[in-house]
């Protein structure tokens, strides 16, 4: 049986951030969390009977997984090892937010073999953190980061967001500087995305959100590229930078368009030609599991064309691009044949190039990735 | 058996939009028992959804009402509906010609409007007996006495017998019915003479073919008769004859004075033209009824499918609409920018909008419409005259001696407080003042000679906004006059986009060019390269804007592996692009082509 990556979704937060479009409930009711963790275990049991291959990476995301009490986190990690066949030394990541962690929790995570910590710090500007609706301030970032080092985490990622309302280039440069100074192994820089249905989405729809605009956003992106490269980070994916040897292996699964199983409400999975997404509603999710069925909401069977399209637009996110040989082996078809016209056109526009048997975005193409991707869907 | 003529009354209702014509018609139907309350769908006479939504009547119909009068006799009243819009003046005149009398319905709060006056004058030309009805007297702001004075002063008809009514509450309905019986003359015309029946409308039924609605003026028509349409010469055998009650009911014959419809397996409405005379093919009338003319389109525009592979669907849809509407005309057009489509002629702007909406709604077509154009008379240096209804068909400047454009005589009625604004507008629209008259202390009628092109552009909207909707407006075509006209081209990325060209007066060209390029800049999404937008007359650029290249479009987050969502977002973006027209290397959205339609300052 083929290996797969395992994702676990913890849909709880202290409060929802103003820009957040992920599935997350700002409930901290212990009973709700408890029954959710029980449901997760039930799902793991069902999943492990059906997919018995080795787990290549594990990622606990959210929400904020670290809002769970220490004992529940401990219990979940134990269950993962009980149910799944996990090779030694696999990457096990957890997302955490400053303000939801302490030394004890860190230690329990490390004991549970979590070896990569992704801190959602977003910015080093107290005003911006407040506007975003984050629960932490700049000081909390230092505390949670230093505590993590002290506890023993040697692979830490910092999530940053740019293009925030009211953000200036100087402000962003400062955030980059502070982040680099902490010397994390990995930094993700996300361009703010205004999602429908979020607080900011509604403000924007009413014209009440003033954003930096395309030119400034581009300048910020380029600033991140140059500053992070200079600091020894390799830009390996549109939004991701890593010190040598510290690329996020779990996320690489997505970009290589390989298989993964998601556990938890709203978690997405991909296996062979099927993609599905679990029920989003906690009650429904719990109920279906109580009845002993997998909580699969939407299931989609992908056509070959869709599989190829997804391989293209996910793979092109990688700076190195898509390995033409891998594509050929996977689909028994040549990228150049399948997308003859598209590639021809895109080569002419200078948005893509073929280097070392890889098809990749040019530096001009990187910030225009969607303009390229749409040609493959 | 046909009803004796002395017990027949044929009438119509003249009213301004919203003055309550449809409600009144409903009430008459209800009162005479043509429809029970249960069967009443509001406003029965307006059958098209569109008509109901816009509160206007496009296609007319006729309904037969049975009324027992206070004199003890049973009367047969034919209510012939009339369209209430300037675009359909000819159709109005034909339905008036089918009547002996008209109810003039005026809103007790609003008073008389320009369109009403135009139609009353038409009715008076046809010697119709006018029964003034002041409607909506139940409104809190009703001023029936003032409106009564206004009718007397403005139209100059006697209002001693005016009826105060409220179609909503039912007040005055019986009085109206009695007035119809007592005051409107019975039809005349010998029932033994050769058949002469006036077509005042026609409809198309996919099973029975074209169905003319007509009024028998002389003679008798029977089922099985061979008939001939005198203008077109086409002959058919009547296989069905009927009346509307309002449900269609078959009858065996209809005699002079009566109103009804016939079916004769007529394949096309082009044989059943409004205004034509039906006669008996075996016993023909010598002369047709007077007044027939073929209606000519006044406004043209190009209609193109957004998705070019729906060209055939658009043709089919237009053909189907034409079955029902002989005044719609269309012809294949090819645009460099928009591909294959049709150049369509309409009676006026409303007619154009209605057709567009029907194509979109009833046939599910997405359309790109080019700016409406009037028909220009282009006199070339060699003396040849071209009628040009499409800016792209304008001959080169060098061979043009001069261009003439159609003018109308416009009548605007407005509260006197807005006289200044109205005159200012007419002046801006290149109008020539003709005269001004006080209708009452408060209301004024202003006459201007105006280029039809200005009316087609934004005159209506401007008039409404500058008079807060208080002014009403009517016009009649007057003839052609020479004007200093130029063709204004729009260049996108240095290429002329033919579908965006317009013909405009030289003095307005700079302003319109400026407005257009600014608007296009807002509507055309950024491309991968800078896109200049220019407005030019010949080779002279008069306005320019640049759309700077798109610099960033990237989805950041991974959505916890929710790649389906990501793909859908990309598919949505792609779909958006597909709906755009590729002109040269630039993708132009549908709305951009509509930009030329919308005026504004």
Image: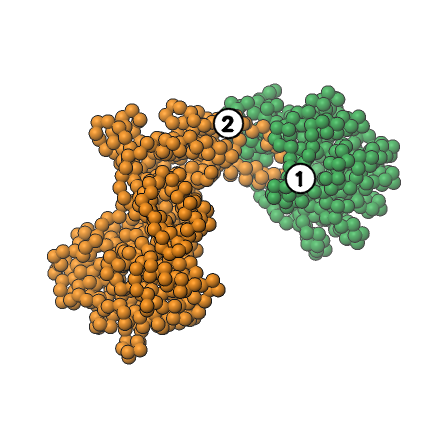
Chain colours: A green, B orange
Residue placed under numbered mark 1 in the picture: B559
| Element on which disc 2 rests | strand
Quadrant of residue A149 within the rendered picture: top right
Question: Which is more toward the observer, A254 or B449?
Answer: B449
For the point 76% across and 42% down, the residue is A64
Q: Is residue B95 above or below residue A123?
A: below
Q: Badge 2: how crowded within 10 Å, few (<14), some, or many (20+)? A: some
Considering the image in quadrants, where does the N terminus of chain A appear? top right
Question: Which is more toward the observer, A371 or B11?
Answer: B11
| Element on which disc 1 rests | helix
Considering the image in quadrants, where does the C terminus of chain A appear? top right
* Pointer 1 chain: B
Quadrant of residue B142 within the rendered picture: bottom left
* Label located before the other in sequence (1 or 2): 2
Q: Is residue A153 left or right of residue A266?
A: right
For the point 68% across and 41% down, the residue is A19
How far across and down, in percent of the image, does residue B336 sit?
38, 31
Which label sits on residue B546? 2
Q: Is residue B199 left or right of residue B280?
A: right
């Amino acid at each position: 049986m083929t290996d797969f990556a395992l994702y676990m979704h913890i849909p709880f937060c202290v409060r929802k951030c103003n820009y957040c479009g992920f599935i997350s409930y700002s409930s901290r009711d212990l009973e709700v969390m408890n029954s959710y963790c029980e449901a997760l275990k039930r799902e793991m049991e069902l999943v492990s009977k059906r997919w018995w291959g080795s787990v290549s990476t594990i990622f606990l995301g959210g929400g904020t997984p670290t809002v769970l009490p220490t004992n529940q986190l401990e219990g979940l990690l134990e269950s993962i090892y009980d149910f799944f066949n996990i090779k030694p030394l696999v990457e096990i990541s957890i997302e955490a937010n400053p303000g939801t962690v302490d030394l004890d929790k860190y230690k329990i995570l490390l004991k549970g073999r979590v070896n990569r910590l992704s801190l959602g710090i977003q910015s080093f500007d107290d005003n911006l953190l407040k506007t975003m609706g984050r629960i932490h301030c700049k000081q909390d970032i230092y505390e949670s980061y230093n505590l993590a080092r002290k506890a023993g985490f040697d692979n830490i990622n910092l999530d940053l967001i740019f293009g925030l309302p009211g953000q200036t280039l100087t402000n962003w440069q400062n955030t980059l500087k502070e982040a680099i100074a902490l010397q994390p192994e990995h930094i993700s820089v996300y361009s703010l995305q205004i999602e429908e249905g979020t607080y900011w989405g509604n403000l924007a729809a009413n014209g009440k959100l003033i954003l930096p605009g395309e030119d400034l956003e581009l300048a910020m992106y380029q600033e991140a590229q140059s500053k992070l490269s200079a600091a020894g980070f390799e830009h390996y994916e549109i939004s991701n930078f890593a010190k040598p040897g510290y690329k996020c292996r779990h996320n690489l699964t997505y970009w290589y368009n390989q298989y993964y199983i998601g556990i938890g409400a709203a978690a997405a999975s991909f296996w062979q030609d099927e993609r599905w997404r679990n029920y989003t509603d906690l009650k429904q999710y719990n109920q279906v599991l109580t009845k002993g069925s997998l909580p699969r909401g939407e299931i989609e069977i992908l056509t070959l064309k869709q599989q190829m399209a997804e391989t293209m637009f996910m793979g092109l996110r990688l700076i190195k691009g898509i390995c033409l040989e891998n594509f050929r082996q996977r689909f028994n078809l040549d990228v150049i044949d399948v997308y003859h016209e598209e590639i021809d056109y895109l080569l002419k526009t200078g948005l893509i190039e073929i280097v070392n048997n890889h098809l990749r975005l040019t530096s001009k193409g990187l910030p225009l990735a969607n303009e390229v991707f749409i040609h493959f869907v | 058996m046909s009803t004796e003529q002395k017990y027949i009354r044929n009438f119509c209702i003249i009213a301004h939009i919203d003055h309550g014509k449809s409600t009144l018609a409903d009430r008459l139907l209800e009162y005479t028992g043509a429809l029970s309350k249960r069967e009443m769908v509001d406003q029965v006479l307006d059958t098209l959804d569109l008509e109901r939504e816009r509160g206007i009547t496009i296609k007319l119909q006729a309904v037969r009402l049975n009324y027992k009068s206070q004199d003890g006799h049973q009367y047969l009243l034919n209510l012939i509906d009339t369209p209430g819009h300037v675009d359909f003046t000819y159709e109005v005149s034909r339905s008036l010609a089918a009547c002996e009398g008209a109810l003039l319905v005026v809103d007790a709060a609003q008073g008389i409007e320009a369109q009403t006056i135009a139609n009353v004058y038409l009715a008076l030309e046809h010697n119709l007996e006018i029964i003034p009805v002041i409607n909506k007297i139940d409104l809190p702001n009703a001023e029936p006495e003032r409106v009564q004075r206004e009718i007397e002063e403005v139209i100059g008809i006697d209002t001693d017998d005016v009826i105060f009514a409220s179609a909503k509450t039912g007040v005055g309905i019986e009085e109206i019915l009695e007035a119809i019986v007592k005051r409107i003359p019975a039809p005349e015309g010998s029932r033994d003479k050769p058949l002469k029946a006036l077509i005042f409308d026609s409809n198309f039924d996919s099973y029975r073919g074209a169905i003319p609605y007509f009024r028998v003026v002389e003679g008798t028509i029977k089922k099985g008769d061979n008939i001939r349409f005198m203008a077109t010469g086409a002959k058919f055998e009547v296989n069905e004859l009927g009346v509307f009650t309002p449900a269609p009911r078959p009858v065996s014959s209809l005699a002079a004075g009566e109103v009804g419809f016939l079916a004769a397996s007529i394949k096309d409405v082009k044989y059943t033209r409004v205004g034509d005379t039906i006669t008996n093919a075996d016993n023909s009338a010598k002369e047709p009824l007077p007044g027939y003319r073929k209606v000519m389109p006044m406004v043209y525009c190009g209609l193109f499918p957004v998705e070019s592979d729906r060209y055939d669907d658009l043709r089919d849809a237009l053909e189907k609409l034409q079955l029902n509407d002989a005044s719609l005309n269309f012809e294949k057009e090819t645009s460099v920018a928009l591909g294959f489509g049709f150049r369509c002629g309409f009676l006026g702007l409303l007619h154009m909008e209605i057709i567009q909406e029907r194509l979109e709604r009833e046939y599910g077509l997405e359309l790109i419409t080019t700016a409406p154009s009037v028909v220009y008379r282009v006199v070339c240096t060699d003396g040849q005259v071209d009628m040009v209804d499409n800016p792209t068909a304008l001959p080169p400047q060098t061979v043009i001696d001069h261009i003439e454009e159609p003018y109308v005589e416009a009548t605007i009625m407005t509260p006197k407080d807005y006289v200044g604004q109205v005159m200012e507008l007419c002046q801006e629209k290149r109008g020539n003042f003709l005269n001004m008259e006080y209708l009452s202390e408060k209301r004024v009628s202003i006459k201007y000679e105006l280029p039809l092109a200005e009316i087609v552009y934004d005159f209506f909207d401007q008039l409404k906004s500058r008079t807060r909707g208080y002014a009403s407006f009517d016009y009649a075509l007057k003839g052609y006059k020479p004007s200093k006209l130029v063709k204004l081209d729009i260049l996108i990325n240095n290429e002329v986009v033919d579908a965006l060209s317009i013909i405009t007066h030289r003095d307005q060209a700079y302003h319109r060019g400026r407005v257009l390029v600014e608007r296009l800049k807002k509507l055309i999404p950024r491309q991968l390269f800078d896109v200049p937008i220019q407005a030019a007359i010949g080779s002279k650029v008069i306005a320019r804007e640049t759309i700077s290249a798109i610099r960033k479009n990237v989805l950041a987050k991974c959505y916890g592996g929710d790649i389906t969502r990501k793909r859908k977002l990309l598919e949505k973006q792609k779909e958006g692009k597909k709906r755009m027209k590729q002109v040269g290397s630039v993708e132009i959205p549908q709305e951009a082509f509509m930009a030329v339609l919308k005026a504004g300052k």
